[in-house]
Image (cartoon, rainbow, N blue to C red):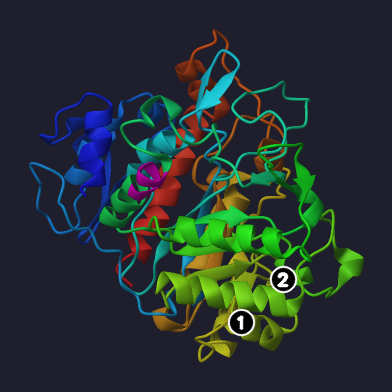
Amino acid sequence: MNTVNELLKAYNFDTNLFVDDFTLNHQFVSGMKKWIGEIVPCELLSRNVKNAVESLDTLSQDGIFYDTFPDVIESPDYGDNWGVSANYIEINNRAIAEMSGNLCRKGLISTIKLLPAIPPSAKSWANCIILSQIFPNIYGDGFNKSAAEENSIYGIKLNTHYSENIIDTDISDKLPPELQFRAFNDLANFHGLKTGFRTVISADQIKVVQPDGSDVTFDWENEEHFKLFLNAHIALINTGFEAIFIDSAKHIGGYDMGNYTGVGALPSYEQMQYIIHEIRSKTGNTHLSFVGEKSTGDFERYENLGLSTGTGFIEPDDFHTVRDEAIDYKYSKNYSPGVEVSNDNDTGGRSYEERLHRINNSLFAYEFPSDKLASFMQMEDMFPLRYDTNTHHLMMSNPSYSTDGTPESHWENLFAKNDGRDYNKKVSELFVHSLNL
């Protein structure tokens, strides 16, 4: 099934595509790699989904403009161990969802609209989008709340539908959520990106929905719960995702619990090892990347767990430190630590110059391109947020910044404006120089 055509038809668009002039006027080019830069996100988020598809088509890496979207799309192929050197860019798809009044929805569609502004993968390594939310959050899913009210993305529900913040329930009769995910993944792959999603493993941060009773807290020792967790992740991988970012992964099996900030029990080392093995086995995807939060220190432990990379404690501000680490791990192609430009706990305050310097180090600090370490960025590193919020705040709460109750006003006010445009241009210039390496 051509899910992109089905997506267009679900919104009552025809499937004939035309070159997008906005894209031609804002594109950055690095060899055959093209994307939109020097923009503020509302310029893309305010467009319709057909505009987004035509924009991606206009940016086609093979130089061919397709009059209708192709039937067969392949993910960029960087071998089974692509995750060791990828750039992971986490997009908070809930924060950019359509905020209409007090409703929050269509975060996946918003992410599709933003895809043209994400640089595609380089010659030597992949760029991978990580979605912050897939599963419903425990409280207030489908609604925005005040900026001061907690509505954590780290608390999820299993054994129920996907988040109403993310899918479009209005078209679910025409295109079920699984096919909405497939359309997103096909469009991302077409643009030269890999995709993944964030998951949580702290038991008290997971609720299991019971059709005939109240929700119960997840229990890693409950075999039914264990299978629910495993099968939910297999189902998502089967829609085309190729990476899973595992929150609190450092502490799996009770490791370094003195620094554990999650809530509730964690899976044993053997349980998580089995989960990762089974996801690869049951989906038939040997090339999946599993990323561990703060999985640093005992690298052999994480490699044997089945992880590909993890957010490390490499000092990202020092070019030579990053370069030396890249040289040290140049032969570690099953697992190596990564460089954080910023993470989901970022509370802001870092200057644009500091962020750009960190991005520069993550893209260029190595002896040879094949030595490059993985890197981790947040949406804010690509598209600066407004002055009074930050990455972590948007993970913990779900405010609308609309001044008139419309989605367009929220998108306009969520991000920095003219200075954000100038910053995005500088990020794009860094990627221009990196993508042909």
| Residue 181 on the magenta segment | yes
**Coordinates of residue 50 in the picture (x, y in percent):** 24, 31
State whether residue 91 is above or below residue 236. above
Seen in the picture, residue 389 relative to 379 is either above or below; the reply is: above
Give the residue type at disc 2: Phe
Q: Name the residue under label 2.
A: 313
> Badge 1: how crowded within 10 Å, few (<14), some, or many (20+)?
many
Stretch in magenta: 178-182
Circle on res. 325: 1
- The residue under the point 67% across, 80% down is 302
Callout 1: SS: helix
Q: Which amino acid does label 1 sit on?
A: Glu
Report whether 313 appears left or right of 429: right
Quadrant of the rendered structure where residue 437 is?
bottom left
Residue 435 appears in the figure? yes
Residue 33 horizontal/vertical position (percent): 25, 58
The residue furthest bottom is: 331
* Picture coordinates of residue 280, whole percent (x, y): 48, 74
